[in-house]
Amino acid sequence: MPRPAQPHAALESAVSDLTVAVGQLLRRLRSQTDPSDLNLSQHAVLSRLDQQGAMTTAELARAESMKPQSMGAILASLEQEGMVARQPHPTDGRQILFALTAGGTEVRRQRGLAKRAWLLAAMGTLEPEELQTVIAAIPLIKRLGES
């Protein structure tokens, strides 16, 4: 049986409110890491390398929707900081792969710990009913993110 549609104005308002709320939460989570820390593009590259393994500059640029020259600059800064390292491509000697180093993995781990600690403390301040509401909403928010 189809669900009744929400009135357009109510749905528009909910979308606006959810966008603002999610944005505020993300900004707050990001603020829990060292402000002199890496920028969002650098963190995105470290995350992608962590999840997908070694990649070429071109592959990373495509995956992050940016120009190869911009990705090259990001990789150069991460390499200088010891967070990524070059590796020979296993089948194409003309290409170079970039892989996460132990230092890059540690930066990701520390950043994740700081975010989790803040969120755990923040959720601990909620009333029991509020906490249950947030917990009940997690699968729905996850489903929206995957749609």
Image (spheres, rainbow, N blue to C red):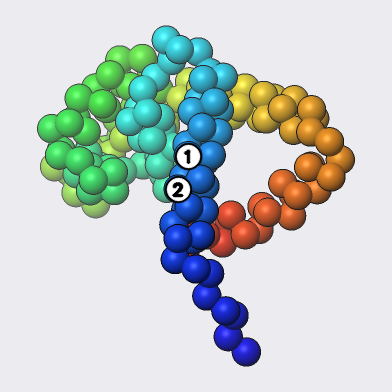
Q: Label 1 to label 2, Cα distance in Å?
A: 6 Å
Give x and y (percent) for residue 129: 84, 45
Q: How many neighbours does mark 2 have within 10 angstroms: few (below 14), some (14-19), or many (20 or more)?
A: few
Q: Label 1: state its secondary structure.
A: helix
Give x and y (percent) for residue 120: 73, 30
Name the kind of residue labelled 2 in the image: Ser
The outermost residue toward the right is 128
Residue at point 55% right, 28% down?
A: 29
Left or right? Give the position of 120 relative to 50.
right
Left or right? Give the position of 27 relative to 73.
right
Front-lying residue, 144 or 50? 144
Q: Label 2: state its secondary structure.
A: helix
Can residue 84 be seen in the rendering of this structure? Answer: no
On the image, which quarter does residue 37 sit in?
top left
Give the residue pinned by disc 2.
Answer: 16
Residue at point 79% right, 28% down?
A: 125
Front-lying residue, 9 or 66? 9
Left or right? Give the position of 77 relative to 32.
left
Give the residue pinned by disc 1.
Answer: 20
